[in-house]
Image: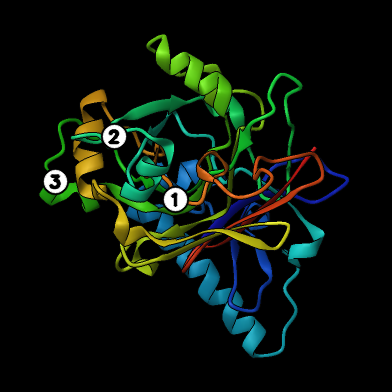
Amino acid sequence: MKLLTFRVPPSRRERFGVLLASGQVLDLSSLHGDRRLPGTLLACIRSGSQGLAAVRAAVEKAEAALKDGRALLASYGLVEIVCLPPLIPGKILAVGRNYGEHAAETGLPSYSRPSGFVKLTSTLIGHGGAIRKPRWTSTLDYENELAVVIGRDGVNIPTRRAYDYVFGYTIMNDVSAREVQNQERREGNILVGKNFPTAAPLGPWVVTRDEVPDPHNLRLTTRVNGEIRQHSSTGDQIHKIPAQIAWYSRTGLQAGDLIATGTPAGTAVGYRGPGAWYLQRGDAVECEIEGIGVLRNTVQ
């Protein structure tokens, strides 16, 4: 299933929904008759199998109604809604230099184990939201990343059980201010260069684990103004998802946490051709991952 959080203009109310096979968004928040239905995606994750079962039942009922030619009262077209970040996690743990060619294009070595930085939840925006280019950077960069959504709490998780803790997957664009990030790295930390407002577009939805049999066999493509910049496979990750979960679980993972699994080559920092690939105001960025969807945002 593809689960999302959205609002219907002009209302500011957040709604929890699911994308149906027809392309319509079923508004689960409006189905008050079934008290088993969770009110938010985060509540759905935390409720375990019971919440997902209730959502699946609602989807089956809606699909049956559409098959019979009946209209759905609690549904919207994608063009009618504004997508919000699918969830606000407790924490976002990001893996750096996890693709060999990307490490090479930055001129830095890959890590001997999963390693990276923390992304603040205050940086999140949804699909269709605007990436606001800070006035203090001229090196705004994109990083298309598969993000793992943790499904239950765990500490010191063994790699062999890692997927038992996965709820699903989504897309995160790890937007970066490179010159600030590089200065911070030289001084021993990375914070501001990765954590300014709108630096983490997320979405457009979370795809449940059952729909992604092999998260290391997905095509990953990034386009800026229609031009392909990144084109790779999640199978090229150096440290695979079970190793990432096992390592980061030392922090104590909680249901709803995110692990951003790294980005492949093709970022602006690694471009050596004429001109520059850094993002400018007016640019349209599309981060696509096979089996999940396309995360689109514009730069302002």
For mark 1, give the secondary structure: loop
What numbered label is drawn on residue 109?
Answer: 2
Q: Position of residue 207 (x, y in %)?
A: 46, 60
What's the residue at 34%, 48% (across, down)? 99
The image shows residue 50 at horizontal and vertical percentages of 37, 54
- Could you tell me which residue is drawn at 76 percent across and 48 percent down? 283
User: Residue 111: where, in percent of width, then height?
Assistant: 24, 34
Q: Nearer the viewer, mark 2 or mark 3?
A: 2
Q: Which residue is mark 3?
A: 159
Image vertical order of residue 167 relative to residue 116, above or below:
below
Label 3, secondary structure: give it.
Answer: helix
Q: Residues within 10 Å of mark 3 (few under 14, many from 20)?
A: some
Residue type marked 3:
Thr
Q: Looking at the image, is mark 1 or mark 3 earlier in the sequence?
A: 3
Disc 2 marks a residue whose amino acid type is Pro
> Which residue is tagged 1?
265
Q: Residue at x 55, y 46 (%)?
A: 271
Locate the C terminus by quadrant: top right
Identify the image quadrant of residue 107. top left
Vertical placement of 224 versus 257: above or below?
below
